[in-house]
Image: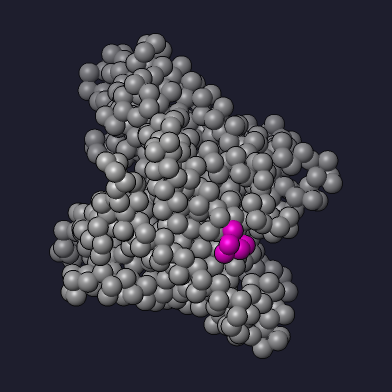
Amino acid sequence: MFQFINTILIGITAGAIYSLMAISIVLVWRSTRVINFAQAGMALLSTYIGYEAMVHFNSFWIALPVAMIGGAAVSAFIELVFMRLLVKRSSTGPIAAVAPIIATLGLLGLIKGVISTVWGGADVRLVGPVTNVGYSIGDKTLAFSPLKLLTLVTVVVLMLLLTVLFQRSSIGLSLRASAYSPEIARLSGVKVDFIRTLGWSLAGTSGAVAGMFQTINGNGAFSPESIEFSLLLITGFIAAVIGGLESLVGAVVGGLVLGLVISFVLMYVSGSLFFIAPFVILLIVLIIKPQGIVGTKVARRA
Amino acid sequence: MHKLKSSRNLGFFVVFGFILFLVGNRVDELRVYQGATIAVYVVAISSIILLTGYSGQVSLGHGALLAIGAYSAAVARDNFHAPVVLTFVIAVLAAAIGGALLGVAAARLSGPYLAGTTLALAIGLPSLANQFPIFGGEQGIFFDVGVPPASLGEDFTQYKWFFWIGALAALVSTWLVANILRSRYGRNWRAGRSNETAASLSGINVAGSKILAFTISAGIAGLAGALLSMTIGVVSPSAFPLALSFSLLTGAVLSGVSTLSGVMIGAVTLVAIPEIADVVATRLGVSETLTTNLPGLMVSSLLILTVLFVPNGPIEQHRTRHARKAAKEKN
């Protein structure tokens, strides 16, 4: 029973981080109809930016916002100089359908290469602001620590902020309008290009938080070749697909479902299925319920 | 007509093979080894061109299919002492079966979904090797095609033997792919790629032809995997990183994803990049970290630049420009 509760707790915390990654995939998808496979690379870069801030100011509470701003800036920069050119240039010919996918992969490689050049390939460390030692009940230790609590709180706060932004502000209305129909939005006076860049930078912010918390929830060490970031790359995508790719709520649900399933598989089946389990889950979801758990029936043929 | 065309094609491949044979005798060991690697890339890239360029399905996980081929060849060789030719056949069949299974799922997915699924496979599958002792875990298992036969002479080196096997395999598989692409199946794939509804209205089983494309492509990728592990000598999970899948994709894009005739461009570039990077690094005297990362940076930048500026590949680009020029002169 105790093990069961711990498995759930681990699953929820991991799922919360996957949710953040899924949110950034969904935000980019909604604003430009591109699956950004470079998102994990951008999250890694933001984490390195956060690490630099940590080295200078020695405070996680400065490092986190710096990483978020850095993530937003990197993301906006990529959208401005790169994605716009891509959309303009390769929209015809046999490669048109796959060009954005291939391009974001190229970006992933480029970002990783830049990181390895600037920071080297060795591990660097990032320490969380609170301890990761679990609370204890009697003589047993829960798999839930102040750090995991902080992770959950951060994710919830970020989710609320995004929801308010989308549902209650005029920027949110523009974001939704340009995702729904860019042409009509443009005719109604929405600055679609600006809104797209904004969507990307929000995604970069969310990815930065995911990267920072993924790192401090692990052993704190990370490098350009970190397994954690390979995992973020696929879990974010899979969580977004489970959630139907279109909605933020879906992304969160998808992240939590994925986190819980992986946690249970690792605990009760085999610990070495770490990498293949997400793939199997993705296949099952795509075959049984391809529109995602909260998705609508349309939006499938991308 | 069709038959005539393919036999003319056969002549071209035979002549090209003879040229390779002459060249292989005249260059040094390093070049011969690079020639073998080029042959591996030609096989792998042609499988991606078939899948992505013709049937319009993206696979970011071809590294995983290469791994299937490599592991099955090595297991057949190590545990059952299969003859070399048979190990290659086994590699093709095993990867084709894996590809068929993946293809069934893939036929239901479009663009980004398929890309993500294959990406997850590329990350997940090699780590499975640690699950089963027969695959030797992280260290991997040996794959030894044996020394060249004595009848080829005393000074016939191991690398030259790799080159011969690789070049022969590349010639045969490229010839096969070229003919498949020109056959009914190739036309079906292109029809399905351009417009699925129109293709199925003309009586093409679009899903079936997509699965077939995945199966054939995977089989060829399996051959590439066996060849790759032949040149390395060992099959291990680290031989099939995500970076391999990416560089193969880069090779395909450089070749022009929809032009098989460009396949050499991509393969040669992939082999040349580390060497060019080395020259550049020593010339400019850059830092050590940059030197190690330069090849990766160059591959990624090339990929991005190609997608941005010559999205359909240099050959197609040239052809279009030529056609435009001809049309202008006519007017």
Position of B126 relative to B321 (above/below): above
- Is residue A108 rendered magenta in the image? no
Q: Is residue A225 above or below residue B215?
A: below
Q: Relative to A48, is B225 on the left or the right?
A: right
| Principal secondary structure, stretch drawn in magenta | helix
Q: Quadrant of residue B99?
A: top right
Q: Residue at x 43, y 19 (%)?
A: B87
Residue A83 at x, y percent in the picture: 51, 71
Name the residue located 62 percent from the left edge and 56 percent from the top edge.
Answer: A244
Residue sitting at 37 percent across and 76 percent down? A69
Residue A168 appears left or right of A261: right
Count of residue discs: 0
The residue drawn where x is 21% and y is 58% is A125
Name the one closer to the observer, A215 or A180.
A215
The quadrant of the rendering that contains the C terminus of chain A is bottom right
Whole-percent x, y for residue A47 in the image: 31, 64
Picture coordinates of residue B319, whole percent (x, y): 59, 60
Compared with B226, B112 (above or below) is below
Task: Give, as a single range, the part of the protein colored magenta.
Answer: A246-250
- Between B313 and A290, the one nearer to me in the picture: A290
Say which quarter of the image contains residue B76. top left
**Quarter assignment of residue B26:** top left
On screen, residue A152 above or below B260 = below
Q: Is residue A278 visible?
A: no
Q: In which quadrant is the N terminus of chain A drawn?
A: top left
In front of the other: B290 or A296: A296
